[in-house]
Amino acid sequence: MDFFEVVEQRRSIRKYEGRPIEEEKVEKLVDAILRAPSSRGSRPWEFVLVTDSDTIHKLAYARSDQPSFLKDAALAVVVCGDERASDIWMENTSIASTYVLLAAQALGLGACWIQMRKRKQPSGRSSEAYVQEILGLPEHLRLQAIIAVGYPAEEKQPYRDEELDFHKVHREKYTRA
Ligand SMILES: Cc1cc2nc3c(=O)[nH]c(=O)nc-3n(C[C@H](O)[C@H](O)[C@H](O)COP(=O)(O)O)c2cc1C
């Protein structure tokens, strides 16, 4: 699959087969993430890869009293930013998260971003504090997102050209519709 096919085919996948992801694929995913661009090459990120089903199940409660679809993922990529290393860790970690999504697609896997930054549990406790406790994250590591990854158990069609917001792209100058 070339890059444009990967981009075209990628959709958020929230249903997963139970089977695990082969270690070679996980390694490819890791290789891709670590090649992501970052401001001044600061790489202000840390990733926790979780495959243990009990831990994944706990993480699935990060935003709700009911477990999210994360519970069925074979892999949770917990994306953290080091706020001591960069004041723009959110941008940097967002780009790395995008790499996870695209690499998963290229590897025949399905993935979906689950927002954690600025999100809370129903009790009012931040999703970040909850995940920090489960994974033993130090305080300077801020939680951006958890990317759920697994073999897809749902099929989604790529967007048709008519669904793309071409009107939001302007040439040379902004043009009002
Ligand atoms: C910053 C960001 C946050 C997102 N947060 C969530 C989320 O918390 N839960 C979820 O199910 N999907 C989440 N998504 C996935 C979007 O819902 C999805 O990308 C969007 O609906 C478009 O669908 P597509 O990815 O299939 O093109 C998030 C995506 C992004 C980029």
Image: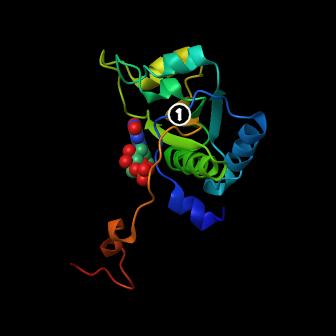
Residue 97 locus on image (x, y percent): 56, 45
- Residue picked out by circle 1: 16
Residue nearest the viewer, comparing 86 with 147: 147
| Display colour scheme | rainbow
Report whether the residue tagged 1 is closer than 8 Å to ligand 1: no
Q: In percent of the image, x 70 and y 49: which residue is there?
A: 32
Residue nearest the viewer, comparing 25 with 15: 15
Image quarter where the N terminus lies is bottom right
Up-down: is 160 above or below 96? below
Residue 23 locus on image (x, y percent): 76, 34
Viewer can see residue 3: yes
Up-down: is 172 above or below 136? below
Q: In percent of the image, x 49 and y 23: which residue is there?
A: 71
Residue nearest the viewer, comparing 105 with 93: 105
Q: Quadrant of residue 136?
A: top right
Viewer can see residue 80: no
Up-down: is 16 above or below 38? above
Which residue is farthest bottom? 172
- Label 1 is placed on what type of residue? Tyr
Residue 159 locus on image (x, y percent): 41, 61
Tell me if mark 1 has few (under 14), some (14-19) or many (20+) residues whose alpha carbon lies within 10 angstroms of its own: many
Residue 175 locus on image (x, y percent): 27, 81
Q: In percent of the image, x 63 and y 47: which residue is there?
A: 108
Image quarter where the C terminus lies is bottom left
Q: From the viewer's perspective, tell me whether residue 149 is left or right of residue 60.
A: right
Which residue is farthest left? 177
Q: Quadrant of ligand 1?
A: top left
Q: From the viewer's perspective, tell me whether residue 126 is left or right of residue 58.
A: left
Q: In percent of the image, x 64 and y 35: which residue is there?
A: 46
Label 1 element class: loop
Count of picture labels: 1
